[in-house]
Structure formats: structure tokens, C-alpha cells
Amino acid sequence: MSEKCDVLIVGCGAAGLYTALSLPENLNVTVLSKKDDTVSNSSLAQGGVAAVLSFENDSFDLHIEDTMIAGQRCNDIDAVTTLVHEGPDQVRKIMEYGVDFDKNEDGTLQKTLEGGHSRRRIVHHKDTTGAEIVDKLLAQAAERKNIKILENRAVFKLTCVKNGIRANVLTGDGQEEYCAAYCVLATGGIGRVYKYTTNPCVATGDGIRLAYELGAQIKNLSYVQFHPTAFNSDGREQFLISEAVRGEGAYLLNCNKERFMQRYDERLELAPRDVVSKAIIIESRRTGSNNFYLDITHRDRDYLLNRFPGIYEGCLKYGVDITKDLIPVFPCQHYLMGGIAVDLNSRTTVSRLYAVGECSNTGVHGKNRLASNSLLEALVFGRRCAEDISNCVKAGMPAPDDFSDHPVSLDGAPMMKGLRTEIRSIMQRSYFVMPANADVVRMGFKRVSEILARLQNGKFRITPDYCEALSLATVAYIILKEVSEK
């Protein structure tokens, strides 16, 4: 028999956990984590949460305007207004859950500045804000009898059934089935479709692929954010140097150890991420070098060790002491602004299917996310998702009544090797920071289309590797299709 629950949440980052905690405690909630429950984009978030928690030197209108400017005014103004107005209460709520934001000596919240913000409004926990939030939300969830978190569960198929949604799930030793009245996708980003990303191994776009297969609308998937200051190393998963480092005074230098942002934007190092990333690429072409650096050595050593302990330790592993050395940086894939199209209540275009967090497209971010708005989006729209489901339950919407097994055969031919590597190479060539020329994009799209068709029709054995390859091919196909049509 399929396991029954009222709400199935696929994903265990901030958005999924906060949705679960915001649901009424009389609903049975199952949260599925693809790997360990701490492996998510949320856990890696360094900067903080942007919210207007005081009107002394800030306002909702200023936060809205900063968000719109960063998003090139392609944002949904209703979604932005909802985010900014409802955000502060959600930040206060997670503080009630024990999230420990840094404070000044007088006990007030310490606020930092990041690119694109006109005011200091970002609250943080050192430089590991995401991990602090996820840890405290997990602790809260553990105390709720109605919430069950299951690790190492990879959803490979969703099916709409009468009054609900069924999920087929890979486990370490086979498969399981779950049937829920409501399903929430909170699967995070798509970073692993690129050769270099700040995202963890789980960020393969699974939720987007699952929603796409159900016929849900996918919107603006080509709105991909490339963070300008990832640590420049040879690893696939790049270590992020938080925007807060620039917010606290770091200079961005070219290969000649010269500041150069004045040539590209009057906001200098604190221009929005897309502006800084493009400036680096143009400057690299001008100088003929990919060597760029952040310099924060002019700040006090004790201050840096206290403010950025995670970044200090992370850089030290590469032999870089940020208190006296320049930090080598270069852009890489970081965040997705597009995704599964949702309304203000996180509803997708498929009945009873919701999406929250990075896999969703609320319209908040436009073409470029304003720093530290992502965790806020997870909280605000996770709560709105939970409220909408609660209202549906109160209205007496019927639950599924068919819990018979519908196992999917996992047998098939072994998948050929190298497909994921090829997809990443195609994406890196075709659409990195700025789209390549039309011929390169067209050739990339043609080859990705061939890979996707082969994976869909090849009758391969269903394994985690196959599912991730299918997700990556689907994501790459949608992105390059959008780019080629522009």
C-alpha cells in the first residue's frame, strides 16, 4: 500500500521546512530529503535575510525599489510587495524558533549591506546564516509529532490521482510510494547543470522536471544568476565569497591588482550581481586574463575573524588568509530566478501541486535576484503555501481514496556514461553570464534535445544517476530553448 499523508513536501531546505512548520498540526506532513536533511542550497547561504525590521532609516518602498532595480523591473510588483511587507513578521517568527542573528553591543540586531541595497537591512548569523536557519527549523520540526522527515529519498515520478498526487520514490534498496492530498515541491536550484556552481550535489532541477512532466507551466528558466565572487578554484562546487564581504568594504581587483568597477557602474563593487558579473567578463576580455581578486585586508583582523569565520576557514583550506592575502574570485552559477510558475499562494498550474523556494517562479526576483532576498522568499511564500493548503482543508476539499500500489519497473538498460558531463559543458559554452552567439546556442540546444529524447525513450534502468541526468537534460533543454527564441 502507498503511504498516506495529507501533505507531501519534496525538499528539506528552508522553504520546505518552513512550509511544514506553518501547516496546522492536525495535518500529517511527510518531508522527503534527497540526501541528508542538512544538504541543501539553504544550508550554504552565507549572507543573511533582507527585511525592513525598523523604519528608522529604511522603508518598505525602499526595499521594493531596490528589488525592482536589481531585477531590471521585470519583477512581478504584487509578488515583490507581498515579499517586502510580509517578510519582517516571518523573520521575527524564525527568531522565536531560536534563529540567532548577530547583535550589536547594545542588543540590537546587527545589519549588513550587500550589492544593490540602499540601506543596511540584512540580518545575519556570522557568515553561515542559511545553516543557522536550517538547523533551527529542523530542531523545531523534530518536536512536531505531525511532521516526519525521511532522508535519502529521491522522487523520480509524480502522478496526478483523484483528489491528490502520488509520488514514486527511490530509496537505497528499492522504491516507495506516497499518496498525498497536496504536494509541495521545494527541491531548490539547478546549479549542477553547469560545470561550476556554488550549489551542492542535490541541485539538479528535479522538482522542475517533475512539474514539467505533469504539464505545469515553467517560466523564465533562462533567468540564471551568476555570482561574481566565487572562489576561483578547479573544483566543480565553488566556495562562495559572500556579497557581504564587499558590503563590508572589500575591493574588486583585476589581474593588475587595480580596481576597475568605476569603468562599468557608479555603484562600484556594490552594484547588483548581474552587473558585477558582466563587468568581470568584459574586463577579462579587455585584459586577456581571468585573474580577479577581492581585497579586504584593510579591515581589522579580529573583525574579519569574527564577521566571516566560515569564509576565513574556507579560504585557508586553499592557502589564502583573507586578513593579509587577496582572494582569487571569478563568476559561476549561483541561483535560479525562473522556475515552476506559481501564484501568490504558491499554487502551480497543476491542481494540488505547489512549489516554494528556488524551484518556483514567484516573480519576486525579475531577471536578477537582489542579495539576501532568497531566504526571505522561502519564508514568505512557504507560509502562504501552508495557509492556502490549510484553507483548502477547512473548505472540505476531499482527500485521495485510492492507496493501492502502482510500482514502476526500475529495470532497463544501463545509461551510457558522460551525459551529465556533456550537458554541463554545453551549458558552460552556450550560456555563461551572457549568452554565446546564436550559432553556439543553436548547436547546444540541438545536442541537448537529442540527449533528452534519448533519455526519455531509451528504456534505461531507473537509478539516481539516470533521474539526475534526465532532470539536467530537461532543465538545459528549457533554458536553451528560451535563449534561442529571444
Image (cartoon, rainbow, N blue to C red):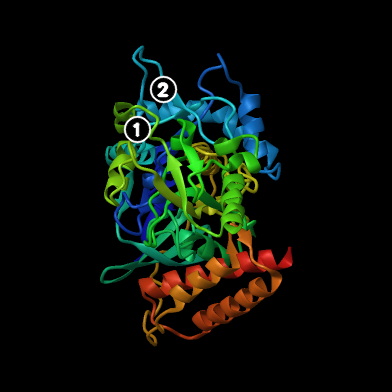
**Left or right: 24 as drawn, with respect to 369:** left
Q: Furthest residue to the right?
A: 486
Check disc 2 and report its element: helix, strand or loop: loop
Q: Residues within 10 Å of mark 1 (few under 14, many from 20)?
A: many
Q: Residue at x 42, y 83 (%)?
A: 460
Whether residue 165 is situated above or below residue 379 in the rendered picture: below
Q: Secondary structure at mark 1?
A: loop
Q: Position of residue 214 (x, y in %)?
A: 57, 66
Mark 2 touching mark 1, by CB under 8 A? Answer: no
Q: Where 459 falls versus 222 (above or below)? A: below
**Pointer 2: what residue?**
110
Give 355 or 121, whichever is nearer the viewer.
121
Where residue 454 appears, as percent x and y from the top left, is 52, 83
Query: Mark 1 is on which residue type?
Result: Lys
Q: Residue at x 67, y 43 (%)?
A: 75
User: Which quadrant of the figure contains the N terminus?
Assistant: bottom left
Front residue of 186 and 353: 186
Residue marked by disc 1: 126
User: How far across and down, in percent of the image, does residue 309 sit?
Assistant: 30, 36
In percent of width and height, residue 267 lies at 62, 34
Q: Can residue 417 be seen in the rendering of this structure?
A: yes
